[in-house]
Amino acid sequence: MAKKGFMARIIEGPERSETYARSTLPTNRWELGWDVFKTNKGKMCGLNLLTMIFLLPALFLVLMRFVLKTTYGKVYPFSQNVGLSYPMFPSTAGLEPNLSLLLNFEVFKFVLIAVLIGAVAISGGFYVMRNLVWTEGVMVTSDFFKGVKKNYFVILFTLIFYVIIMMLSITSLNMSSMMLAAHRGTTWLLVTAQVVTYLIMALVTMMVMYMITLGINYKLSFIKLIRNSFILSIALIPTNIFFLAFAAVWFIIVFLGMQFITVIGVILCLIWGFSLFMLVWTNYSHWVFDKFINDKVPGAKKNRGIYKANADENDGEPLVIERSKFKEKHVKPITDYDVEIYELPTSFSRKDLEKLEETKEAMRRDSDKYAEEYANEESKPETIEDLMKADEENSSEGN
C-alpha cells in the first residue's frame, strides 16, 4: 500500500497498523477513565458548566460562610496579644465556637433551597457521566435533563439525608467545643465525642457518594440504598478514601493557600472540576458494582465500556466486528442472479414498464429461494482475528 503524502497525513491522521484500533480500546478502568476524558473534553466542559449553574446556591452558601468566618476572625480578638495600645477584653473563652454555632444556624436557614436546586445538578450530571463511562452516545444538555427527570427525587432524598446528618454533626461539634472552652464536663469524653462525630461525617460522606451512583444505576428502595451504601463504605474504607481524594484533587489544590497553584486549581475547577470529580467516582463505583453487585443482579452487564478479547454477553464489550445486515439475511449477490436485468430505453412505453416489473418479480423469487436454501446456516459475528485471517487468505489467493 502506498504511503500517504504530507497533506493526507495532516487531514486524515497518521497511518495506523492493523492492530492500532484494537490496541487503543480501554481494557481496564484506568484506561477507560483516561479514554473518556481524552475523547470527551468538550462534553465534559459543557457538563461542568451545567453542573455549576445549578450548584451556584450551594457554592454561594459555602463562600458566604467562609467570608463571615474570616471576618469574625479579624474583628474579634481570638489570637491578639494584649499589650500596649490594646484595650483589655474580658475572657473570650467559648466565644469562637459560640459565634460558629450562630453562623451555622444562619447558613442552615438557606440549605433547603441549595439542596432543591443542587439535586438538579447532581442527578443530571451523574447520569450523563454514567452514560459516558458506558461509552454510549451522549447529548449533554438533553441527557442532563433526562437524568434529572429519572433520578431527581432519589438524589433529593439522598441530599436531605446527608444535610440532616451534617447539620446535627456540626451542631454537636460546636456544642462540645463550647463546653471544652468553658471547662464543663469531662474533657476526654468531649474529645472522644468530637472524634466519633468526625468519623460519622466521613462515613456518611462515603455513603452518600455510593447512594448517588447506586440510585442512578439500580432501582432500590431508600432503605436498601442506605443499607448497601453503608456496607460498601465500611468494606472498602481505604480505597474509598483514596478515590474520593483523587476525585477532589483540584478542589484540594484550591485550598492549599499557595497563590500560583490556587489560581491554576480555580481555572481547572471552572473548566473540568466537577465533571472530573463525577468521572473518577462514577468509574470507581462501577468497578465496585462489577465486583460485588452485578453478579447478583439478573441481566446486569459487567465491565461496560471495557473491551475484552474473549468477553461473554454479560462481561465487557467483546472485540467484535459484525457482518453486514445483507450477509446476515443471506441476500444473494446481484452478480449471481440468473435473470437478465431489463434496462428501460430512453423513450419507454407501458409495455417496457411491464417487462421491467416482470424482471424485478423474477429477481425477488430467485432471492427468496436463495434465502430459504441458506436459512439454517448460522451467521456469527467475526472477530478481528478472523477478519485478519480472511484478509491474509484473500491476499495470498490474489498473489
Image: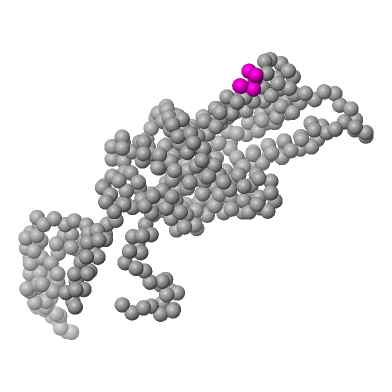
Magenta stretch, overall SS: helix
Indicate the position of residue 32 as horizontal and vertical percent values. Answer: 41, 52
Q: Quadrant of residue 104?
A: top right
**Which portion, as a residue range, is magenta?**
188-193
Q: Quadrant of residue 1?
A: bottom left
Q: Is residue 146 visible?
A: no
Q: Quadrant of residue 214?
A: top left
Indicate the position of residue 145 as horizontal and vertical percent values. Answer: 46, 46
Please say which color scheme the image uses.
Answer: one colour
Residue at 51% x, 40% y is 242
Left or right of 196 in this view: 336? left
Residue at 62% x, 51% y is 265
Residue at 22% x, 65% y is 389
Residue at 43% x, 41% y is 285
Q: Is residue 295 magenta?
A: no
Q: Nearer the viewer, residue 3 or 8?
A: 3
Indicate the position of residue 127 as horizontal and vertical percent values. Answer: 44, 45
Left or right of 118 in this view: 213? left
- Residue at the extreme right of the image, as rendered: 85
For the C terminus, give its image quadrant.
bottom left
Figure check: 150 above or below 341: above
- Residue at the extreme bottom of the image, as rendered: 346
Q: Is residue 319 visible?
A: yes
Q: Is residue 189 magenta?
A: yes
